[in-house]
Amino acid sequence: MTKYFEVLRRDGPARLGKLLLERQIGTPSLLTADDFSSAGSIFRHSSLEDAASAAQALIESRPDAKRLTIMPYAPAFLRSEPSVILPTCKMDGPKGIVLQPFSSEKPDEADVYVLAFAGVLRNPRDLISAVVGARKCIPPDTALYAPALATPANLAFLVYLGIDLLDSTRVVADGLLGRYHTRDGVWDAKDLSELPCRCEHCRKLGERRDDGRLLAAHNLLKLEEELLVVRETTRSETIREYVERQVRVTPDLTASLRVLDQEHRYLEMRTPQQRRSTFFANTGESLQRVEVTRFAERVIQRYKAPQSDVLLLLPCSAKKPYSMSRSHRLFAEAVGSHHRYLHELILTSPLALVPRELEEVYPAASYDVPVTGRWDLEERAWLCKCLDAYLEKNRYAKIVSHLDGELEEAVKSHGIDAVYTGGGTNGPALVRLSEAIAQACHGAARLPDARLLRYRALADVYFGSGAGEALLAGKVQIRGRELQDERKKPLAMLTVNGALALSLEGAKRIEPLGRYIVTIGDFMPKGSLLAPGVVDADSEIRPGDEVIVRGERAFGLGKAKMSGWEMVASRRGVAAELRHMKEMKQ
Ligand SMILES: [Zn+2]
C-alpha cells in the first residue's frame, strides 16, 4: 500500500509530498474531478452487491491508468457510525476511501482518505477534532483529502492542520453565488466599490459585478496563488509563523489555531527538533508553541545545572547568541574573573529560561520577539512556573538578579530570594553588578571548564538525562570544537548551528542509555535509510534529531528525517540520512 504517495518534507503537521496519479501531484494540492473516479454513495445503487460491482467496474474501466478510485461509501449522520460496513475491495491502482469523522472503526488500507462532511465542519472544535482524529487513525504515509473546504483565507491553516489534498469546490460555488474571495476573507461582490485585485477576471468584473463565472475564476486564481505561498512557507519551514498571522482574518480561524494548540501532543509528535528559519514569537499563540514547551521541558527535566554556589540571572538580548550582544559583553566585563565561580541563567520570553551553556541550541539562538519591556500576566506566570521548577531541581546558595523593569518586578514579586541590582548596562549599573557578584562569589567553589559544561549540557538536552555523564566519562579533553577521549579519539563536536554531532566513539558511549536509537534489519545501509528498513525506533525521535542506527551488521549515526513513530508506521520515505556507518564483523 501507499505505493502512490510519499511525504518528502515536514514542518509540523504540514507536509510536502508527491501523489503519483496519471499526473504527478506535488502536495499540498487541489484535486480536480479529472484526478479521480468515485463509486459514490451506496444509496445510488440498488444493493451492496451492485455498489461493489460498480466499484469493480470503475477499477476495470481503466486498468492501466493510475487514476484515484474512491470506493463506495455508506453515508451516515455526523458523529454516528456508518450504517453498513462495506466489503473490502482489492485493487492495484491508487485507492481512496471515504472516512467518517469521529468514527471508531479502523478504516481499510488506502492511499488517499477522503474526509466525509469536510465541507460542513465549520465549527473550529469539530474541524480540528475530525482532522486530528483522522490523522491519528490513518497511516502517516497516506494522504488526507478534505473536499469542499478550502478558501484562500483558510488554506494555510488547513495544510498546517495536516490536510494534504483540497479542492476548488467551495470557492467556485461561492463565485457562482456572487461571493468574492481573497486571502483576507470573503465579500459579497456587489458590496465592493473597488476590487482589490488586478487579475484579468477582475478587470472584466469592473462593469459586470454579478458575473458568477468571472468571480469563480478569480476565486480559483486566489486559491491557487495561496497554495503556492503555503507550499513555499512549508518548504522554508515558516508555516507556523505564516499561519499565526493568517488566522487573524476571522475569529473562527484564530479560534481554530487556539483549539489546535490544545492538541499539544499531536503537534509535538510532528514538530521538528530544529528549523532553519528564525522563530518569530509575535503573537499570544507563540507562547503555546511546541518549540517553547519542548525547550522548557528539556531545560527543566533533561538538563542539570553544574554544581555552583552562585546563580546570576540576566535578561536576554536581541542579538543571538546572547554572549555576542553588547549588553552581555558588558555584563561579562563586570563579572570579570568571577565567571569561574558562578552559573548564568538568561530569562526571556517566550522560552523562559536559557542556561548559558544552551544559548546556541535551537530555538535559543534563533528566535525573535517584539521587545517592549512589558511582561504580561501570561508571560510572567509561564516564566515563574519554569523558574520554580528549575530552582527546585538546581539549588544555589546565592542568587544575584541583574534584571530590570517589569522583569525584575516579576521575579521579585514572585518571592525569589536574591540580591537585586536593578539591572542595566550603564556605568553605575555595571558597578552594582560587579560588587554584588564579588560579594556573592566570596568563598564560592570554582566551576569546571565552561566548555566541558557545554558538552555535558548539550548531550543531556539532546539525548536525555545521564547522556552528558556517559559522554564525558573518564578523562576527556577539548581541542577546538571537538571533544576527545584520553587517546585523542573524537567523541563529539559542536556544529556551526550550535548542535552536538557525535562520533562513532561518542555514540557507543551514549547507546547503552537506549535512547534515540533506530534499529534496522540485517543489512548495511548507505546514504539514506528508508522507512521499510526500520525495525524499531525510539518514539521520542523527531525530524532533525541525531540518531544512533544499529542493526546486526551495521552501527552508525544519522539525522532523522521523520519522527520515530513515523519510521515504524511508514512503508515509504526516507527515515534518516546516514553518516559514519560502520560494518560490524559477524
Ligand atoms: Zn482577481
Image (tube, rainbow, N blue to C red):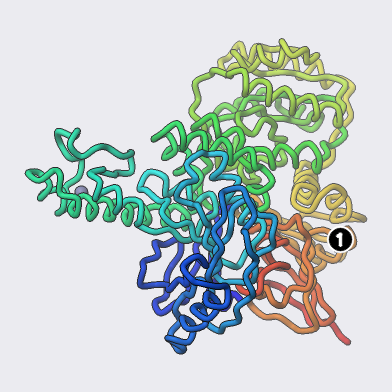
Amino acid type of disc 1? Gly
Image quadrant occupied by the C terminus: bottom right
Q: Write down the quadrant of residue 347 in the picture.
A: top right
The image quarter containing residue 30 is bottom left
Q: Does 482 sit left or right of 64 as displayed?
A: right
Residue 430's place in the image compared with 160, above or below, is: above
Residue at 59% across, 13% down: 405
| Foreground pick, 86 / 323 | 86
Q: Residue at x 48, y 34 (%)?
A: 254
Please provide percent x and percent y for residue 428. Answer: 61, 11
In the image, residue 140 sits, relative to residue 400, either above or below, namely below
Give the x, y percent position of residue 504: 79, 69
CB of mark 1 near ligand 1 (< 8 Å): no
Crowd class of label 1 (few under 14; some 14 to 19; many from 20; radius 10 Å):
few
Q: Which residue is mark 1?
A: 514
Residue 139 makes an appearance in the image: no
Q: Is residue 432 visible?
A: yes
Residue furthest bottom in the image: 64
In the orientation shown, which residue stands out farthest toward the left?
Answer: 207
Counting from the top left corner in percent of width and height, residue 370 is at 48, 28
Give the number of callouts: 1
- Image location of residue 205, percent across then percent down: 12, 47
Position of the N terminus, as image quadrant, is bottom right
- Name the residue at 49% across, 62% down: 16
In the picture, measured across the screen, residue 521 lies left or right of residue 320, that is right
What SS does tag 1 mark? Answer: loop
Q: Is residue 209 left or right of residue 563?
A: left
- In depth, the one of 25 and 313 nearer the eye is 25
Q: Residue most toward the right?
A: 474
